[in-house]
Image (cartoon, rainbow, N blue to C red):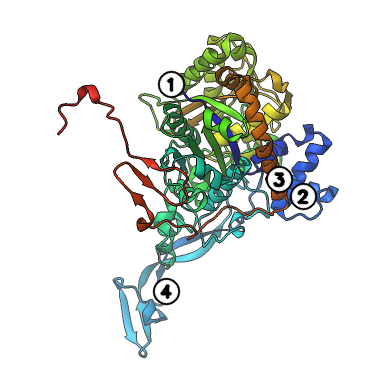
Amino acid sequence: MRLPVITGFGGINAAGRLSFHHGYKRMVIDAMSAAEQDSTFRCLAGLMGVERPGDPASRAYMRENTLIRRIDVFDPARVFIQSAARLKSAVDGKPLVFVLSKRHLPGSIPPGWHLDSIDDNTVRVSIDETDALFPDYRVSRVSSAGMLPKGFNPGELYQSRNHPRGLQLAVYGASDALRSTGIPIERLKQVVPPDQVGVYSASAMGQLDNEGYGGMFQNPMCGKRPSSKNVPLGLCEMPGDFINAYVLGSAGGTGGMIGACATWLYNIRHGIEEIKSGRKRLIVVGSSEAPVVPEVIEGYRTMGALAEDEQLMALDNSDVPDYRRACRPFSSNSGFTVSEAAVYTVIMDDELALELGARILGAVGGVYVNADGYKKSIPGPGIGNYLTVGKSMAMARAMLGEKGLRERTQMYAHGTGTPQNRVTESHVINEMAKAFGVERWPVCAVKAYIGHSLGPAGGDQLAAAMGTWEHGWMPGITTVDHIADDVHASNLQLPLKHMYIEPHEQDGAFINSKGFGGNNATGFFISPRVTEKMLTRRWGEKHMLDWRKRNETVAAVAADYDGRADGGEFPPIYQLGDAVVRTDDLSISSAEIRIPGFGKTVDLNVANPYEDMSGDKH
């Protein structure tokens, strides 16, 4: 069976650019060396348009305008609404009279309206009473969110043409992940057959801002028309479609798996099964979501799911909400915090990774998905997460051994910051730790820093795990000062400060996701050190030596991208209308299809997988 090897990783969230661990380092920046802090602030400065990243005032600005903070993508103190009213005639019995352009008359004249033409273009309207909508504003009861670093607008980096923000993030995130490999797309297309590439990406909720579904639903209510783009660009699988059509130029497998807050892991699972089976050799997998819009926030708030300003003030006995500490996993808390992100991984089978000299960033041991069975309510907890965590731990035990599982793994929890999650998820992971003999399992909850990005949330967690593999510091739950009494933690470590774990003592990490409707997923990911050991056992020392020689060039190209991207020199990959293959450009026979731009053909010599069941051939 082929091993799915992570050879590229990137994207963007509230902590910054994810490739080369910059976003991770922003979360643990106070534990980083001076050199690492410099590189992180330099990266943030490039994103945020800050000219002097070494200046103390600039660094204070970058700290304040990253991670969870007061909403700045819209004004939470002035959210547009329309207030319904009933207009009646004056008390003296005279009708209410107003003048209206004839082109503004309703197509269906309301009952009780009396019209008198003034001229060809204008009409006088007399009414006794009628319903009306008045433009109005309200103050949002939720004012905190995890937003991209202030000043960074992905739509300004390419010809975004009014793309929804979630698709802008997908273009940026996938570009970052692909360039982080150090291997040009053109090189990949020469080596991998077109049909052995796959892109698996989706958003959990679709694109809900005005350029997507938001405009489709809102415009008719605001006197506007939906655009021709609202419906197609709002689709949940559109992040993957954009990557195929404008970033990678793929003619291979595609599809978006949707599983609420487990969407990112659902897509990883789909992709690695294709790799392990041999159907695909290269996949780009991830999710993109931009839900920091007033309607989404209000929708989750009315569910009682979000941390409201008043609740935050009550927790702190304060007159001012502490926006930075809005998300408080496994402590006294009131709800989760919405955020935006795009997180993408480039995964190859082990043979291809070694052949290309690819960067070895880790591997995927397995991803498991289970539903909850019968439930009392759709958002309520269930049994499925016990199964996903149990199966992923069993796989880790089989691959790492008892000692490896018990002493050299960490759990990156869903950790939403809701009262229900702190009880239910802690019980799941604590009980499974007991069952497998894990006495003090380190648990990380990165939503404390960057909030809940919904679909990409699992990718946010893996970004922290990969950074910990490299630098050793596991982010602590620094937004809390205690663990709540109802949290199950007899076999867990829930550090309130950054926790150092020697990189050579980390064999793997678990990424846990719990989604609405019983969409549970847990992934087991293998550290780079263990991945290289596995590859050495399979391929031998000589093969690995050859890989290291090829990797020198690849790593240098990747490092060059990282350095130049800090200065904003690399806009996202976006090829609109470039290298389009027309149908008459194909070379077609019964044995193969050749596509211009690809070094290998699509092989049509397919064996019959049901040979023993097939009858006579005619």
For the residues labelled 4 and 3, the Cα–Cα distance comes to 76 Å
For the residues labelled 4 and 1, the Cα–Cα distance comes to 64 Å
Identify the mark nearer the N-term, 4 or 1: 4
The residue at 42%/74% (across/down) is 91
Q: What is the three-letter code of the residue carrying label 2?
A: Tyr
Q: Residues within 10 Å of mark 4 (few under 14, many from 20)?
A: few
Reading the image, the residue beneath label 3 is 560
Q: Which mark is residue 91?
A: 4
Q: Is residue 131 left or right of residue 169?
A: left
90 and 602: which is toward the camera: 602
Identify the mark nearer the N-term, 2 or 1: 2
Question: What percent of the width, then of the height, locates residue 34?
Answer: 83, 37
Reading the image, the residue beneath label 2 is 61
Identify the mark nearer the N-term, 4 or 3: 4
Nearer to us: label 4 or label 1: 1
Q: Is residue 420 left or right of residue 237?
A: right
The residue at 37%/89% (across/down) is 118
Cβ atoms at labels 4 and 2 below 8 Å apart: no
Answer whether residue 475 is visible to the viewer in this image.
no
Q: What is the three-letter code of the residue carrying label 4?
A: Val
Q: Secondary structure at mark 4?
A: loop
Reading the image, the residue beneath label 1 is 383
Question: What percent of the width, then of the height, locates residue 241?
Answer: 44, 49
Identify the mark nearer the N-term, 2 or 3: 2
